[in-house]
Image (spheres, grey):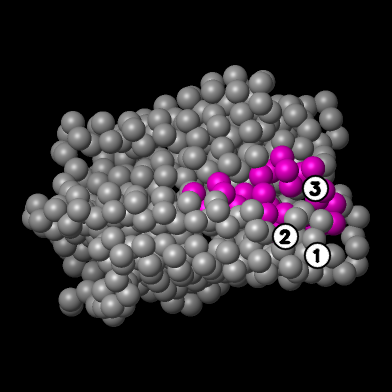
Amino acid sequence: MFRSFLTVSSGTLASRLLGFVRDSAIAALLGAGPVADAFLAAFQLVNVVRRLLSEGGLNAALVPAWLKARDAGGMDAATAFAGRVLGTVSAAVIAAALVIGVLMPLVIAAIAPGFVGRDTLQFAVDDARLMLPYLAFAGPVTVMMALLSAQGRFALTAFSPLLFNIALISVMAVLLVRQQEPAQAALVMAATIGAAGFLQLSMLALRGARLASPLRVSFDPDMRGFLGRAIPGMVASSAPQWLMVAGAVIASTSPSAVSWLYFANRLLELPLGIVGVAMGTVLIPEMTRAVRSGESSAIAHAESRALELAVGLALPATLGLMVLSEPTVRMLFEHGAFTARDSAATAQALIWLTLALPAHVLVKALSPAFFAREDTLTPLLATLKAIVVAIATAFLLGQIFGASGIAAGIALGAWSNALALIRKGAATFGFSIDADARRRLPRILAAALAMGALLWLAEGGLPSAGSHGFAQAASLLVLIAAGIAGYGLFLQLFGVTGWREAVNAVRQRRPA
């Protein structure tokens, strides 16, 4: 499981790092004004729908159903079932994209009511319509990625999303050289997003077309049962994005707040992507096999290792982002039209938003225990409750503290989600944590706190905001590298794990 987790995490890390390059270019091209707010609101809409399908969401229903079909009728039955899923999901997504395109003014007004009556609304509608073709490709892409994951083939699934960022960065590089006017640049970037999905689909089709054959659109009882489980699972797996949409709805009434929250969330998504996407991709097949085997030791092992990985990566990332929020935002985004004022506001929002990271990762680690038992309703209800909590608290806190208060409301919504899953899981089937996990988890916490304390002491030695950009960046990168190395050293000193043990885990392959 660790080997597969590392494969997916590596691909996600590469994609997220390219995403920072992409967002830095967006900040330089558009700044944080009305054009940026419109583009980012449209992009967030497309991003939520994309992640509704991908990043482990469809795995929640497709992997258990595919394994059941294979066990009952062999690979031919599983391939035929996959063909019906691919045809049906593709047709549904294309139809949905057409409907959303027609109703786009109403959709944007619903997710950003503060844009109504301003030019920002029309900017957002135009951008979102140009982005919509991406969704037509996202359906088949996601099905093929889930099928590859079900068979333990994670490399292509992990690295194919790189094409999206590569295409967008290439276009933005040209726009920056030409010093394109922001409104026109936003339209060109939106059209590029619309076409980028075709690149990813083409790459996956070369390897995954034989996994789903023949293609059919079907709504037979098996397919209706699958969709009945898939739709709640996809919504539940996209909880972080839904919470950000809830925050954007509140933030749309305040100038630049949508942009500040978006850029803060982009930093949060680096560790969340590395851990969360890998959890959704790797842990669901692992948990499904364990649950179907009926062996309590296998279930306990999968749940324990997942919790250790989640806590071991989320805690140091949380503390690191909180301590280094302002210098990190300055390094990545304070260029061109993005000002020092924008950096300060984004950094403050990031501090509060980062409090949601441990909760998001816990949800990613706990949800597969429900998905493996073909229960997608419980995570859905927990997500809906979290959205209500986030909207209510973000509205109240946003009135007092602005964008930072909205970020705090999003964090409270995330913790509501995690706590609901913990209570329900403990009451129904009970989470199985083995002795190794009970020994390691407190030591992981101690190692993370020690690393956070060292970063806090060292952060004061970073160059001031007025220093040369290269000096700031180099000093920050050295400090981040030292924090990672120090955390690894503390893990070894506290007896959690060592270098040799980690290398051996990577080298191990799953038995045939």
Residue under the point 67% across and 20% down: 399
Label 2, on which residue? 463
In this rendering, the label closer to the viewer, 1 or 3 = 1
| Mark positioned earlier in the residue sequence (1 or 3) | 3
Distance, label 2 to label 1, CA atoms, is: 8 Å
Q: Quadrant of residue 245?
A: top right
Residue under the point 34% across and 51% down: 446
Please tell me whether mark 1 sits on a helix, a strand or a loop. loop
Circle 1 packing at 10 Å, graded few (<14), some (14-19), many (20+), is: few
In the displayed structure, 219 sits above or below 284; it is above
Question: How many marks on residues?
Answer: 3
Q: Amino acid at mark 2?
A: Pro
Q: Nearer the viewer, residue 339 or 451?
A: 451
Q: Quadrant of residue 7?
A: bottom left
Q: Which mark is residue 340?
A: 3
Distance, label 1 to label 3, CA atoms, is: 14 Å
Q: Which mark is residue 378?
A: none
| Mark positioned earlier in the residue sequence (2 or 1) | 2
Q: Amino acid at mark 1?
A: His
**Residue 351 place in picture, x, y as percent:** 58, 41
The answer to the question of whether label 2 and label 1 lie on touching residues, with beta carbons closer than 8 A, is yes
Extent of the magenta region: 319-347
Q: Nearer the viewer, residue 409 or 479?
A: 479
Please tell me whether mark 2 sits on a helix, a strand or a loop. loop
